[in-house]
DNA sequence: GTGTTTGCAAACTTTTTGCATGAGC
DNA sequence: GCTCATGCAAAAAGTTTGCAAACAC
């Protein structure tokens, strides 16, 4: 992942420039946060991590929107209704997520658990039965993370 | 699915009653919508479908919240940042979702594409390496649905 | 220098909450 | 009849937008 991440630090600015967008402070700040963390973050979480640089929330929204449009970010996950963003698989490699049901924390899990055979079979199946063309997938594993298992919550 | 759905129409009211909650108009209306439709809906979408019965949005929010707490509904999916709800797998059976990247529509896909062997292996793997106990999973297949493929959008 | 991008504030949307009235058991 | 639940309206939270000033190129 680190080789790809290094690549991203070069190629993402290039992509911005090549499409006529500028590499500004807020955009750099948002990208830095997402380079360093291998977990999807909400706008609020991103904003919290760039506050030192006095970046406005509106700018975070706009940066995230732009980076999504450019295919740099993807809407990774939205545990309990908030959209979360991370570098797209083009930069991080294909991977899945571990999501804690208790605290909502998300961790990356490198690699794919689905075999090519299974994917090909389901592709054919839904193409015929639903007229739906599959172009990608997203697998989330839910459960309880270590810290939460150690401090069990009482029933509500 | 229809056998289970019939079961849900009986067992869900029972579950409400057994925990001291009442089977009220708004709650019935929300449940009816979700019984009939095999796709996750947002609060706004649920509300649109119960408007004839003059149910307030606030009541839809409260009903959805309660039904989630009771394990009757689950947060199924949140394509583009809005939370969507559907009957939990206890009532619908284990299934996955087809999600159209173009229009955001979600369809159910019965059955599971992951083998027991794969699930057991990953369970062991993340238990050891991450101290994470997997209790369930969610697989989403992204792509283009028939209608959207027929009416391609011009590039932005 | 020029045109894009930002910060700020205001508008807008979505979700939550308080309280008097109405409905389920 | 006794509560719990709803509707309404207001508040809170989250997101988008217009515009003058600031900055990347």
Image (cartoon, coloured by chain):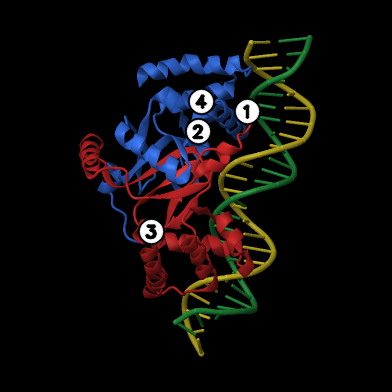
Chain colours: A red, B blue, C yellow, D green
Q: Secondary structure at mark 4?
A: loop
Residue B114 seen in the current view:
no
Q: Quadrant of residue A45?
A: bottom right
Sooner in the amino-acid sequence: mark 4 or mark 2: 2
Q: Which mark is residue B73?
A: none
Of the residues tagged 4 and 1, which is closer to the observer?
1
What quarter of the picture does the C terminus of chain B occupy? bottom left
Please determine whether, in this image, residue A146 is positioned above or below residue B24.
below
What quarter of the picture does the N terminus of chain B occupy? top left
Which residue corresponds to the image point at 44% horizontal and 63% vertical from the top-left? Answer: A67
Q: Secondary structure at mark 3?
A: helix
Where is residue A95? Give x, y as percent: 37, 50
Of the residues tagged 4 and 2, which is closer to the observer?
4
Q: Chain of mark 4?
A: B
Q: Which residue is mark 3?
A: A92
Residue B118 seen in the current view:
yes
Q: Are marks 2 and 1 in contact (CB under 8 Å)?
A: no
Q: Secondary structure at mark 2?
A: helix
The answer to whether residue B101 is left or right of residue B32 is: left
Q: Which residue is mark 1?
A: A155
Q: CA distance from mark 2 to mark 1?
A: 29 Å
Q: CA distance from mark 2 to mark 3?
A: 36 Å
10 Å crowding of disc 1: few (<14), some (14-19), many (20+):
few
Q: Which mark is residue B72?
A: 4
Please determine whether, in this image, residue D25 is positioned above or below residue A120.
below
10 Å crowding of disc 4: few (<14), some (14-19), many (20+):
many
10 Å crowding of disc 3: few (<14), some (14-19), many (20+):
many
């Amino acid at each position: 992942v680190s080789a790809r991440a290094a690549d991203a630090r070069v190629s993402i600015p290039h992509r911005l420039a090549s499409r006529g967008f500028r590499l500004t402070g807020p955009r750099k700040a948002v990208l830095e946060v997402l380079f360093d963390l291998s977990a999807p973050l909400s706008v609020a979480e991103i904003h919290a991590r760039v506050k030192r640089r006095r970046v406005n929330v509106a700018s975070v929204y706009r940066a995230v929107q732009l980076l999504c449009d450019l295919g740099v970010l993807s809407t990774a996950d939205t545990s309990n209704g908030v959209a979360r963003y991370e570098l797209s698989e083009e930069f991080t490699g294909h991977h899945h997520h571990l999501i804690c049901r208790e605290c909502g924390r998300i961790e990356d899990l490198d690699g794919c658990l689905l075999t090519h055979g299974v994917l090909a079979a389901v592709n054919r199946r839904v193409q015929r039965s639903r007229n739906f063309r599959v172009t990608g997938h997203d697998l989330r594993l839910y459960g309880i993370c270590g810290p939460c298992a150690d401090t069990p919550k009482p029933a509500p």
